[in-house]
C-alpha cells in the first residue's frame, strides 16, 4: 500500500475495505463464468438469440474482477486465486451454470446476480466513503453504474420475452 494512503486509511480500515473487495472479486469471477459458460452452452432459442450477448456480458464482469484485483493489490493484498474459495467467501455461494441453460432460466438467475451486485457495490461505496477511501469509492460507483445498467437490461429483456 502506498505510504501516504496507508497513513490516511489506517490498517484497520484498509482491511475492512480489502475484505469487501475480495468478496466482490469472488462474485465477479463466479458471475463471469456463469455468463461465459451459458453463452457457449446455451440450449434452445437462446442459443441463436441471446448467447452472444451473454458472452459480452461475461467479459464485462471479468473487467470488474480486474479492477477489483488492481485495487486489492494497491491495498497490499492479493485477490482470492483459488476457485474453491470463490464459492465459500463470496456472496453467491455454490453455483453450477449448467443448471440454467435455457433462455428464461439464464435470465432469471442473471437478474438475481445483477440485483445482488447493485446492493454490494452500493454497500462498498458507502463503506469506502465512511473511511475516506475515495479511490475505492470511485471504483465502486463506476462498477455500480455498470451493474445498474446490467440489471435494467436483463429486466427489460425478461419482461418482453415471448418464450414461455
Ligand atoms: Fe460485475
Ligand atoms: Fe453485472
Image (cartoon, rainbow, N blue to C red):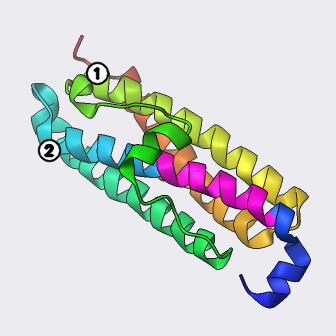
Say which element carries label 2.
helix
Q: Is residue 38 left or right of residue 6?
A: left
Q: Which is more foreground, mark 1 or mark 2? A: 2
Q: In this view, does 155 lie to the left or right of 140?
A: left
Residue 1, given in percent of the width and then of the height, sits at 71, 81
- Relative vertical location of residue 137 with respect to residue 20 in this rendering, above or below: below
| Residue corresponding to mark 1 | 104
Q: Does the magenta stretch include residue 25?
A: yes
The secondary structure making up most of the magenta span is helix
Q: Give the range drawn in magenta.
A: 14-27
Q: Pinpoint residue 55: horizontal percent, then vertical percent.
A: 25, 51
Residue at the image point whose x is 29% and y is 31% from the top:
96
Q: Image point 14% across, 44% down: which residue?
A: 40
Report if the CB atoms under discs 1 and 2 are less than 8 Å apart: no
Magenta segment includes 86: no
Residue in the picture at 34% in, 29% down:
107
Residue 2: x, y in percent? 74, 87
Tell me where residue 138 appears, x and y as whole percent. Answer: 71, 67
Residue 123 occupies quadrant: top right
Q: Which of 1 and 149 is in front in this view?
A: 1
Q: Say which quadrant the C terminus sits in.
A: top left
Q: How far apart are marks 1 and 2 (CA)?
A: 16 Å
For disc 2, the marked residue is 40
User: Where on the picture, by quarter, is residue 98?
Assistant: top left
Query: Looking at the image, is 50 positioned above or below residue 22?
Result: above
Q: Nearer the viewer, residue 10 or 34?
A: 10
Amino acid at each position: 500500500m502506498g505510504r501516504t494512503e496507508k497513513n490516511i486509511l489506517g490498517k484497520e480500515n484498509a482491511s475492512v475495505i480489502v475484505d469487501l473487495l475480495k468478496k466482490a472479486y469472488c462474485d465477479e469471477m463466479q458471475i463471469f463464468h456463469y455468463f461465459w459458460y451459458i453463452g457457449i452452452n446455451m440450449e434452445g432459442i437462446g442459443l441463436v438469440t441471446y448467447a452472444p450477448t451473454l458472452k459480452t456480458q461475461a467479459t464485462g464482469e471479468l473487467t470488474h474482477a480486474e479492477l477489483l484485483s488492481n485495487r486489492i493489490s494497491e491495498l497490499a493484498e492479493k485477490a482470492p486465486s483459488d476457485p474453491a474459495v470463490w464459492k465459500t467467501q463470496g456472496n453467491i455461494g455454490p453455483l453450477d451454470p449448467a443448471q440454467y441453460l435455457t433462455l428464461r432460466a439464464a435470465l432469471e438467475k442473471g437478474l438475481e446476480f445483477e440485483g445482488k451486485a447493485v446492493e454490494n457495490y452500493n454497500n462498498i461505496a458507502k463503506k469506502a466513503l465512511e473511511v475516506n477511501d475515495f479511490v475505492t469509492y470511485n471504483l465502486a460507483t463506476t462498477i455500480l453504474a455498470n451493474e445498474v445498467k446490467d440489471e435494467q437490461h436483463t429486466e427489460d429483456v425478461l419482461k418482453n420475452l415471448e418464450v414461455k
